[in-house]
Amino acid sequence: MEISLVIRRRLKEMGLEQRDLARAAQVTESYISQLLTRKKAPPAPDRTELYDKMEKVLKFPHGELARLAGLQRREALKNALGDASTPLFKEVRELILRKCHPARRKHVRPIFEKQPFGELERLVTQKLLDVVKRLAKEELQNERWVRLVARLSRRRYEQMRVLVLEFLDTDIFNLSAEQCVTFLDPLIESWDIDLATFGVEIILSRRAAREPLKKFEFIERESEPSEAEKSGLRDFLKDPSLGGDATGEEIEFLGRLRFKGKQPTPLYYYRELQNLRDPLHFSPPVPKRTAASRS
């Protein structure tokens, strides 16, 4: 059953108006109206406390509206698969380029223009969007923060709460110029990227973020152990006579070992542990030279 129908029915049963629900949820009456007339999709349950507030005033069991919203969103996504949206990125691109570090902008702009919505533009846009959405989600319950952002974009508090909810539901394919002006423009001071490593550095507004500097780097990770490797280590740890006294640090070391197709037995891990513990297998630590010894 659609969440809008469930809410409308409960409002009627309790003799409440849409304005009562809007007041309790701290959003505009217009937003509630569009939600109940299906002009707006229900927001994602994990990105907002809206459902908790509505459940309290409508006396629904905790999590019921969020569950219905999740089901409805999954069904809508299923119907929309294969119908990819065309990104409208001209205005968005200009704003993102304007925020780029001046020294890097002259190198980034030609790439953006040569490959519209290519890999680099998607990478940068996604990182900027992720950072600002995370900030907005963390601060949604902070009235002072919401009022600050509302003041920066010349909107009322209730309007800004609605805009934050909608912003948390967007993605890089549907990011609008208005959302960029409302959120990315005032909340992002600048960004930079290392074109050799694709490491991204983002500086948020110090007025709006407690931790303004965000860094993202791409690092090489070791492959995950195969199921055969995991099986040998698990059996080793289960046997008290083999791995019963292994410390957390030793287990971590054994778990990092890789075998390229071979299947280690519990006995292998036992012998590896003894080798690790045998002081004869390691040189004594070199003492640090003090200032006195160097003189």
Image: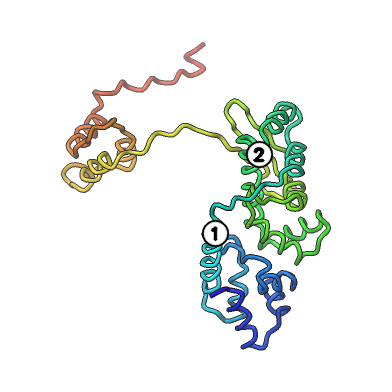
Q: Tell me if mark 2 has few (under 14), some (14-19) or many (20+) residues whose alpha carbon lies within 10 angstroms of its own.
A: many
Q: Where is residue 83 in the image (x, y as percent from the top left)?
A: 58, 53
Q: How many numbered marks have been drawn onto this rendered protein structure?
A: 2
Q: Where residue 67 appears, x then y in whole percent?
A: 51, 69
Kind of residue at disc 2? Phe
Secondary-structure class at tag 1:
helix
> In terms of depth relative to the viewer, which is nearer, 157 or 267?
157
Q: Where is residue 249 in the image (x, y as percent from the top left)?
A: 34, 39
161 with respect to 73 (left or right)? right
Residue at image point 71% right, 82% down: 17
Residue 230: name its quadrant.
top left
Which numbered disc flags the more N-terminal residue, 1 or 2? 1
Q: Are marks 1 and 2 in contact (CB under 8 Å)?
A: no
- Find disc 2 in the rendering and name its residue: 117
* Circle number at residue 284: none
Q: What residue type is labelled 1?
A: Leu
Image position of 120 with respect to 161: above or below: above
Residue projecting furthest to the front: 83
Q: Which residue is drawn at 72% across and 57% down?
A: 145
Answer with the quarter of the image where residue 227 lies: top left
Is 86 drawn above or below residue 2 in the view shown? Answer: above
Q: Give the left or right position of residue 148, taking residue 128 as reference.
A: right
At x 29% / y 30%, what residue is drawn? 260
Q: Where is residue 218 in the image (x, y as percent from the top left)?
A: 53, 34
* Residue with the mark numbered 1: 77
Name the residue: 68% across, 36% down.
116
Q: Is mark 2 on a helix, strand or loop?
A: loop
